């Protein structure tokens, strides 16, 4: 049951080429440097993996085209923006070898 003050998260389906569709819940969105970005997670409640997706769709396209942001400079610029928008989260980057 959802309390009145709880916000229901929007669910999107990400369809990567050559892979099965994946459902994500949108935590927040922002616009930076002329591009729209969304912060998504794989779980509606609790701790989960989060990704920042960049919208590459052109004006007038019916469906959005998102790519996962993986460039360090772009992630470093976006993480604090999303942390400010969502007071109760801290984004931690998984370090790859």
Image: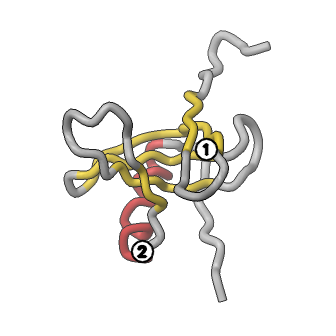
Number of residue marks: 2
SS at circle 2: loop
- Residue 49 spot, x, y in % from top left: 68, 55
> How many other residues sit within 10 Å of disc 1, few (<14), some (14-19) or many (≥20)?
few
Residue placed under numbered mark 1 in the picture = 88
The mark lying in front, picked from 2 and 1, is 2
The coloring applied to the image is: secondary structure
Q: Nearer the viewer, residue 56 or 52?
A: 56
Which quadrant would residue 59 be assigned to in this image?
A: top left
Q: Is residue 85 left or right of residue 13?
A: left
Residue 67 in the image: state x and y as whole percent.
44, 57
Compared to residue 39, the image places residue 59 above or below, namely above
Identity of the residue drawn at 68% across and 46% down: 42
Q: Which mark is residue 71?
A: 2
Instruction: Give the farthest residue toward the right.
Output: 1
Q: Residue at x 55, y 45 (%)?
A: 14
In the image, which disc is placed on residue 51?
none
Q: Position of residue 27 (x, y in %)?
A: 55, 39
Q: Secondary structure at mark 1?
A: loop
Q: Residue at x 65, y 10 (%)?
A: 4
**Which corner quadrant holds the C terminus?**
bottom right
In the picture, the quarter occupied by the N terminus is top right
Distance Cα–Cα, label 2 vs label 1: 25 Å
């Amino acid at each position: 049951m959802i309390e009145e003050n709880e916000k229901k998260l929007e669910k999107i389906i990400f369809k990567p080429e050559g892979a099965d569709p994946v459902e994500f819940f949108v935590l927040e969105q922002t616009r930076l440097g002329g591009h729209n970005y969304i912060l998504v997670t794989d779980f509606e409640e609790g701790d989960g993996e989060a990704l920042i997706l960049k919208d590459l769709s052109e004006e007038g396209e019916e469906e959005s085209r998102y790519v996962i942001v993986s460039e360090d400079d772009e992630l470093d610029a976006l993480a604090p923006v999303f942390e400010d928008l969502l007071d109760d989260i801290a984004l931690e980057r998984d370090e790859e070898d």
